[in-house]
Amino acid sequence: MNTNLDMNKKVKVSEIAAVAGVSPATVSRVINQREIVKGETYEKVIQAMKQLGCSINESPIPQPASTGLILINIPSLNNPFYGAIIKGARASISRHGYSMLINEGHINPGTIDLLVKTLKQNKVIGLITMNCIETSLIKKLSDTTCVVQCCEYNEDTDLPYVSINDIASAKMAVEHLLAQGKKRIAFINGPFRYKYAKHRLQGYMQALEEAGVPVDQEYIVQLPEIDSDLATSAALQLLNLSEPPDAFFTVSDVYGAAVLRACYLSKRRVPEQVAVVGFDNLEISKSLVPALSTVNQPKSQLGFMAAETLFEKITNPAIPNKKILLDTELIVRESSSL
Amino acid sequence: MNTNLDMNKKVKVSEIAAVAGVSPATVSRVINQREIVKGETYEKVIQAMKQLGCSINESPIPQPASTGLILINIPSLNNPFYGAIIKGARASISRHGYSMLINEGHINPGTIDLLVKTLKQNKVIGLITMNCIETSLIKKLSDTTCVVQCCEYNEDTDLPYVSINDIASAKMAVEHLLAQGKKRIAFINGPFRYKYAKHRLQGYMQALEEAGVPVDQEYIVQLPEIDSDLATSAALQLLNLSEPPDAFFTVSDVYGAAVLRACYLSKRRVPEQVAVVGFDNLEISKSLVPALSTVNQPKSQLGFMAAETLFEKITNPAIPNKKILLDTELIVRESSSL
């Protein structure tokens, strides 16, 4: 990395950050890409550096803003959900003249160091994460580069994010099933470490409680990952209960498709005997047999807004962190339309 | 980029390459990452440089091999096919201690310059492409970094690749439909610029010809992209012919799912009235109603072998370029099992 910091004595970036009252990542940007850091913040960092006895070499750096790279982290390429989000992000990133690469994989104590190394060794000026990440690790990332969270976010940090209201979205889906006259509504959920899983469970419970329908723990299934086979088995098990569910709400269309498959295998008519509503509005969902009702996430917009928020933050680190929740919509198709 | 080439006079990398009889990318690697280029090739380049009046600064570069980045280019994140390939590639790349990022998008005259810039500005030591790329553009990429093609490859270049035998695979699928007693087999193909599309059409035709079944051009549909809606419409149109097909072979499970949907909408029983075989063995295919027969591509292995081939080429550029075709297998499920 082309730092042109004249070190009159050894000073750590973190010390400059502490004196300037900004993040270490902001200090790095002032040093390496100062043309993209706005006036006030820039001045703070320069003053702190002077105070600590180091200064920036004032000769111009032949480095246009657009040499930087934006990195997008997604949990898995196997879930087609992320494709449309990245399409939206790409639209924003191209507009700003930057290039974008994708990092796939979970961020955990075993992978964080390699990711931080990748951020540092390449000209990564900003990171959009879509993973569920421990607070200590997301802080490590935001000390390294500018971070915006998309979909999953940490409620106990002050980072910018763009997401949806999962509680209201899940509630809307379950209220639709109740309105179709369904009473025994099963819920197939994902791993509970995800914010979406916690919030969608809340929305499910709220809808039932407000309708005076008792919550039956037997109808709530928590799966360890987004996997079709697991979900089909779980649904078949529920359909074999002495009092089987008459509807399913699932946190992913992948699970929704698996429930349709379980209904086919156990010879239940959809939606007459069992209604199904998924989540995400994947490309495939409208092609399923029967077509799957779902909660549409504004995927392109999520990606676009996350990237725009990132650029705002990169060019002006002093602005307050934006926390944006976008609206979802219920798409009623054959699988729940009585 | 940290070139430490002592230029006594101006010499282009391409000139050194021509004299040494190696690619310009190899010269770049000798200059920048000489610790990973094997003896004989290294010597050739050094001799050529001496001959042209320039030399490498012999002071050691503090740059371990594992600081390099491997880039994988995929056409689209919307096709879940690529997820499993990348999983395989990741296994190899981790084993070699490198990190990996994904570049999504088509490679064409409008995008090549940004990609080359991205390759140069980051420490990209190798590139795996899964796109269909014009020969002049793939040459531009292989002049910049070490390239291995995966799935799609250019038949008119000498680059290493790992792919499948598309002709034999398509032939196997169509022969299976013929063996089920089907005679009017429609074929839904993808964009013809892809090698896979050309070869699978050949395989389809060969199977029909060998069985003495006349090829009916009306049954062959060429779609411009992998899109469910388009494929459903195309299938419905075929099913409305006065002599509708009694089977479909499609080049993607995404299309296969769309055909199942078209059969549902036009009230045809699958597989009795219409049998369907897709391609790729996507995760979702076994969950469809009915479960979709398909040609399984050894996706993880394709990715793993592509990355292993890349590392062999990086560490020893002088070895002949490997051209590997892996075996596929037919998976017969409900949609074609009579």
Image (spheres, coloured by chain):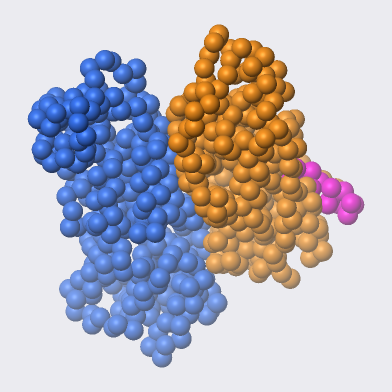
Chain colours: A blue, B orange
In this rendered view, identify the residue nearer to me: B319 or B192.
B319
Q: Residue at x 21, y 23 (%)?
A: A56
- Which corner quadrant of the image does residue A64 belong to? top left
Provide residue A88's location: percent of width, then percent of height. Answer: 37, 40
Q: Quadrant of residue B10?
A: top right
> Is the C terminus of chain A in the top left, top right, bottom left or bottom right quadrant?
bottom left
Majority secondary structure of the magenta segment?
helix
Q: Identify the residue at horizontal 79%, vertical 65% (top origin).
A: B180
- Give percent across and percent down for residue B43: 67, 28
Q: Is residue A152 above or below residue A41?
A: below
- Is A11 a magenta residue? no
Say whether residue B323 is visible.
Answer: yes
Horizontal side of residue A177 vs A55, given as left or right: right
B33 over B85 or under it: above or below: above
Residue at 45% from the left image edge and 77% from the top image edge: A235
Residue furthest to the top in view is B9
Task: Give the extent of the magenta segment.
Answer: B199-213
Instruction: Tell me: B70 left or right of A245.
Output: right
Expressed as whole percent of the image width and height from the top left, the position of residue A310 reads 27, 38
Q: In the drawing, does residue A130 fall left or right of residue B301?
A: left
Q: Quadrant of the N terminus of chain A?
A: top left
| Image: B104 above or below A219 | above
Q: How many marks?
A: 0
Q: Residue at x 57, y 45 (%)?
A: B226
Camera-side residue: B227 or A336?
B227
The answer to whether residue B266 of the structure is visible from this angle is: no
